[in-house]
Amino acid sequence: MLPEQENPVTPVIEARSLTKRYGDVTAVDGIDFAVRSGESFGLLGPNGAGKSTAMRMIGGVSQRSSGELSIMGLDPDGKGPEVRAHLGVVPQQDNLDEELTVRDNLIVYGRYFGLPFSYLRPKAWELLEFAQLTEKADVRVDDLSGGMKRRLVIARALVNDPKILLLDEPTTGLDPQARHTLWDRLFRLKERGTTLVLTTHYMDEAEQLCDRLIVVDHGRIMAEGSPSSLIREHSSREVLEVRFGAQRNEEVARQLERELPGRTTPADRPLVERIESLPDRVLVYAHEGEAALEAVTGLGLAPITSLVRRSSLEDVFLTLTGRSLIE
Ligand code: ADP
């Protein structure tokens, strides 16, 4: 390992005013971020935010239009092969060789890196065990489930022992059980010190996996921080979700906006911090959701359903942009 990789304060990835334009479209619009060694760093944003474009520039497969980018101290424009040698890349679409067996996918991929069979044979078994695919070693890839394929793509990306693993939407299209299995594997990588950089439009994935993240929209960074600090900074402690039926939600939200602000809890906190109206429900941002619910029912309103929950990154995104992450 190089000394700079061991120093947690020296970034392994650094972007300054990173920009990518496709004709008139500015997909990534001057973003700045730094990823530290061993950190799990996320780019969270809705479809079209520019996450994959940023990832492709980091991966050295797309040239930036302007700005600066450094991966392990190297500029991917010009030092592409050297940069890629440090990276493991898990693309959004599985691009396994469906005709080959599970194990041969690892070995053939390793051969692209020029790794010798004497290294690859034991390495393939180690990676299969890590990906919980040992029993599938001799099965053809087209017989695997979606979750198993994803785990194999991750195992394959680890064949050259990369310092940094890039994951573009790692669990899109997987069922909940397969997602949890995959998250567990990624936690283990993180524990071993691999730097993870992932894009996602799932707030639960970002909350589970990321030490720190940037919230991206229209190619720009809206906020940056750990999931808990982002929630603390941009949302209330709790959220009351109430449904009054599609016809009435908007009207009730306006009534709540008229009647609830200014009221305080017994501890002298504002009862309600903010009210959002979505097509299917009204969100009441409050320190104490139950107290907010009492106030709502105290106005003679009877929600069809009500739920008090903790604030999430979805609420952060809604506060920052006025829109949902998944539309
Ligand atoms: P995300 O990964 O957040 O869904 P993308 O990076 O894929 O977002 O896309 C960001 C924007 O850039 C979108 O408007 C998309 O249509 C545009 N875009 C992405 N790739 C290309 C391309 N190869 N050519 C033209 N426009 C592109």
Image (tube, rainbow, N blue to C red):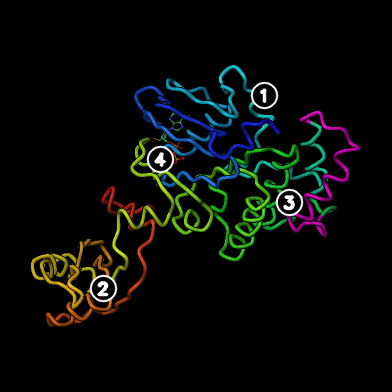
Q: Which residue is mark 1?
A: 82
Q: Which residue is mark 3?
A: 142
Give the quarter the ligand 1 occupies.
top left
Q: Of callouts 2 and 3, which one flags the residue occurring earlier in the amino acid sequence? A: 3
Q: Of callouts 2 and 4, which one flags the residue occurring earlier in the amino acid sequence? A: 4
Q: Residue at x 25, y 68 (%)?
A: 286
Three-letter code for the amino acid on which mark 4 is drawn: Gly
Circle nearer the viewer, 1 or 3: 1
Q: Which residue is mark 4?
A: 48
Circle nearer the viewer, 4 or 3: 4
- Specify few, some or many for label 3: CA neighbours under 10 Å numbering under 14, 14-19, or 20 or more: some
- Spot the residue most to the left: 258
- Specify few, some or many for label 4: CA neighbours under 10 Å numbering under 14, 14-19, or 20 or more: few
Secondary structure mostly seen in magenta is helix
Residue 238: in magenta span: no
Q: Is residue 289 above or below residue 57?
A: below
Circle nearer the viewer, 4 or 1: 1
For the residue with label 4, is its CB less than 8 Å from the closest atom of ligand 1?
yes
Residue 109 image-quadrant placement = top right
Residue 115: in magenta span: yes
Relative to 252, 167 lies left or right: right
Three-letter code for the amino acid on which mark 2 is drawn: Arg
Report the Cα–Cα distance between label 2 and label 1: 55 Å
Asked if residue 59 shows in the view, the reply is: yes
- Specify few, some or many for label 2: CA neighbours under 10 Å numbering under 14, 14-19, or 20 or more: many
Chain part drawn in magenta: 112-136
Report the Cα–Cα distance between label 1 and label 3: 32 Å
Report the Cα–Cα distance between label 2 and label 4: 30 Å
Relative to 267, 43 lies left or right: right
Helix or strand or loop: what does disc 4 sit on?
A: loop
- Specify few, some or many for label 1: CA neighbours under 10 Å numbering under 14, 14-19, or 20 or more: some
